[in-house]
Image (tube, rainbow, N blue to C red):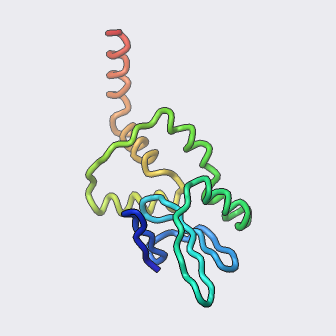
Amino acid sequence: MRKVIKGRVYNTATSKLIGSSKTHELYKNTKGAYFLYSYSAKVKRIAPLTDEEAQAWANKNLNMKEYEAEFENMGEIESDLVTRERVNLTLDIKILANLRKLSAEKHIAMGRMVDKAVMAMYGEEFEKLSKNGESSD
């Protein structure tokens, strides 16, 4: 099922299934937004969820392994919000597709993966920039 709500696409065919109960399935779309797909004999609907709502639903409805696979790093990610800034980047479509796949497989946020890649390539230069910036203050 596919539905656009407030400009966001929610599609069960292209999203990651986190877990399910008797009449609900929790998904995470390719942009990282959670949604609940509810179904019965008569009604099928999609409802967007906040991260907190998705975590609460999962805590109540999923087994420990399913829950931990998705949410074990949630507290770590929330603490990052103080030191992180959202930016828009243009990436090669193949790189982005593979980054999304790897992020889902490794359960590591794409932003963290980009951080690690940049530091692996330019870490020494970043340290020099930091030292130069500290001495000029």
Between 65 and 23, the one nearer to me in the picture: 23
For residue 78, what is the image quadrant? top right
Give the side of residue 69 with respect to residue 123, left or right. right
Q: Residue at x 39, y 46 (%)?
A: 114
Which image quarter holds the C terminus? Answer: top left
Give the side of residue 66 with respect to residue 88, left or right. right
Picture layout, residue 19 above or below residue 53: below
Between 9 and 112, the one nearer to me in the picture: 9
| Residue found at the far bottom of this picture | 41
Q: Residue at x 63, y 60 (%)?
A: 69
How many numbered marks appear? 0
Q: Residue at x 40, y 68 (%)?
A: 9
Picture layout, residue 87 above or below residue 47: above
Residue 108 x/y as whole percent: 51, 52
Residue 81 x/y as whole percent: 50, 38
Give the side of residue 47 with respect to residue 136, left or right. right
Between 106 and 73, the one nearer to me in the picture: 73
Picture layout, residue 41 above or below residue 83: below
Residue 130 x/y as whole percent: 37, 21
Between 50 and 74, the one nearer to me in the picture: 50
Residue 2 x/y as whole percent: 43, 77
Give the side of residue 112 with respect to residue 87, left or right. right
